[in-house]
Structure formats: structure tokens, C-alpha cells
Amino acid sequence: MIFVTVEGVTKEGIPKKLDLVLKTSKDNETFRENLGKWAFENEMQVYEDVFTAFESFQNQKKVITPFAAYPKCYKCLKLNKKEILVFDNLRALGYELHEKKLCLNLNHTRIVLQEYAKLHALSFALKDQNRKQFDILTGSSTDLMLDFLKRPNTTKNINELIQSTLTSLRERGQTHLSEKFARISQGGASKMIEVFQTVDDQAVITHGDCWNNNFMFQYKNNDRTAPTAVKILDWQTSVLRSPACDLAMFLAMTSSQSAHLFDQLLKEYHEQLSEFLVQLGSSPDLFTFEDLLKHWKNFIIALSIFAPLEFAFILAEKEDLPDFGEMKEGSDVGDFMYMPIPADEAFYERLIPLIEYIDV
């Protein structure tokens, strides 16, 4: 990331200042061909095509509080072996990252779910009212998450972390949780891939990368417990998939300590989705609450399979995280995706409520 301030004068002679952030791709050619280049091109397509179409659609419908929970993108640049996106610097606008090692409280969780409800409703409504345009928008995206999951070393690492978790729970004297997680994680990475490969007619344009560091919150009166706005970052893995994928990934990765409230949060999300669908001129019957629960059951299991690896990365110190800029020729991004189970009790404080919540 490069932070810059641009100062100048408008055509009318009025001084103007822009605080910007430049998101630039890594130079490492092996990483670029593995993932990096495609991730940036995917995100550019979201900002240039998807959000432009969503904005136009909402203007057409005269929506009072539209979905706009993403940073303003001024320019997408494709140069020789380099991609650059130019955004508003959200910090200069008063937005802050949440501490990545801490679960979100309910106020933070709810404000994100409100925006996801709008995001998903836009897909349902646009597909309902202009299927041709929707198909064009979704026809060129790359499923980077599925590609990542299918890589042999990713699969190996997910399965190894599951086994380590089962052993660790037994050693802690929590045999009943170990046995339950064994049932939940049956099939391992293959089960997760199977769920992620399922794309039916109720699939929407998802965010796709729903962990703490991809949300920036705005607050009033220094009250860090109750955000007044959120911006959703990093749309590189956005793809056509069930809305339940975003919900399961977000709730499992950021809010698992509130797992006992997941069912209530799903109801609130669906009410907001239905209300926004009506504002957009479509019927809530496009995705009923029963549909949501059917999708949710599969995706919350899939994301629980992924949880040990994800929690290990979330709780790792910055210096222990892999540096994709160091990838050597012949290596694979999956080689870098391993992190041992942390000794930190926070790992279990996140995982155990998730295990207890799931009904298997």
C-alpha cells in the first residue's frame, strides 16, 4: 500500500485535496502467475463493472439508503506486470480497522450483515429484472477461492490442521468436543470443495473474503463499541456463490463467540434482505428464509472445516505470516498456507462456540 496526498485547484479555482491509497500488486512473478495477477484483475472487474452497475440500478430505483459500503475507487491501472487500484484513504475519512485478533461485538457484526443483505439483494433483484446484464457481470470472474482450495498443499494443510485440532481437544480433556468436531469435519477439505463448487440459480455476487481485516468502521464520540458505518475491503475473491457463503465465512471467522446468536442474526439478515428486495422492485420469495437455512447448513459446516487454519492465521504474529513476495519459481501458493495451532487460548475461545453451535 502506498499512501499519498494530492493537492490542486479545480477548474473553478477552488483548492482541493485528496488523501489516497494505492493498492499495488506484488512484483514476484511466481506469485503473480499463481494468484496475484488474477486477484487484482478480479477486484478491478468488481469496481469497474459490478459496482457501477449496482449504483446505476439503485439510482434507477431511487433507493434512499443504497449499498455503498466500499471505498471510492478513482482508477484501475493495468501496467506491464503491475496492477494498481487508487482508493480514497479511509483513515483520513475517520474509518478504522478492528483489532484482528478479537471477535467483533454484536454492534459490529450487525452493521456488516446489514450491508451484506443489501449486496446480496442487489444480485437477486438485478438477476430477476435484467438477467442478461447480470450474466454479463458474472461471466468473467475467476473463482480464486475454489482454485486455492483445490491445490494439493492447501488440501493437505486443511486436513492436517483438522487432525491437530482433534488431538489438541482430546489432550485438553474435551473428548466430547473432539468427537463432535470429527463428525463436523468428516470429509475434510474435499467436503469444503464440494460445498464451494455448488452454484445454483440462487447464487449472488459475494464479497468472498470476510475476515476482520477486510472491514473498516467509523465511530462517533469515540465510542468504539458501536460503529455508525462500515466499508468492506478486498474484493479479490468476489465470485458467484450462495449468499450463505459470505454469512458463514463472516460469522465463523469474526463472530464465533456469538455463535449462540447465529440463528437470530440470520433472521435479522433475511428481514433486511427482504426489505431491500422490495425497495428494488423484486419479491422476497426469490430467496426465502427456508432457502437461506438450507444453504447455511452446508456452508457453516464447510467454514468450520476451514476454521482451524483460518484461526491459526488470524492469531499469528505479523512476523510469522508467510510472505508471498518470497515465492520461488516452482513453488505454489498452497505451500505457504500452513500455520500450527497456536498455544493461545483465544484459538479455543473462537473454535469451541462454533463446534457447540453446529447441529450434526
Image (spheres, rainbow, N blue to C red):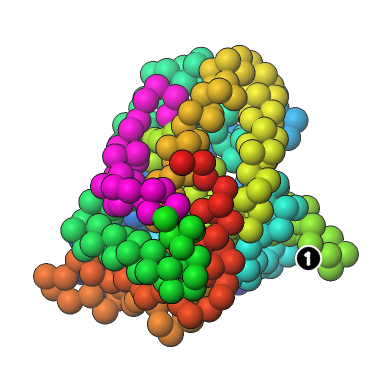
- Give residue 20's position: percent from left, percent from top: 57, 65
- Image label count: 1
Viewer can see residue 232: no
Residue corresponding to mark 1:
224
Q: Amino acid at mark 1?
A: Arg
Viewer can see residue 326: yes
Secondary structure found at label 1? loop
Q: Which residues are magenta?
A: 180-203
Q: Residue furthest left?
A: 330
Residue 69 is left or right of residue 360, and the answer is right
The crowding category of the residue bearing disc 1, from other C-alpha atoms within 10 Å (few below 14, some 14 to 19, many at least 20), is some
Residue 244 is left or right of residue 353, and the answer is left
Residue sitting nearer the eye, 330 or 211: 211
Residue at 45% x, 77% y is 342
- Give residue 321's position: percent from left, percent from top: 40, 77
Residue at 26% x, 79% y is 326
- Give residue 232's position: percent from left, percent from top: 58, 52
Residue 172 is left or right of residue 262, and the answer is left
Residue sitting nearer the eye, 125 or 192: 192
- Give residue 281's position: percent from left, percent from top: 63, 16
Q: Residue furthest right?
A: 221
Q: Residue furthest bottom?
A: 319
Q: Is residue 152 magenta?
A: no
Residue at 29% x, 47% y is 187
Q: Is residue 183 magenta?
A: yes
Residue sitting nearer the eye, 229 or 79: 229
87 w.r.t. 290: above or below: below
Residue at 38% x, 54% y is 182
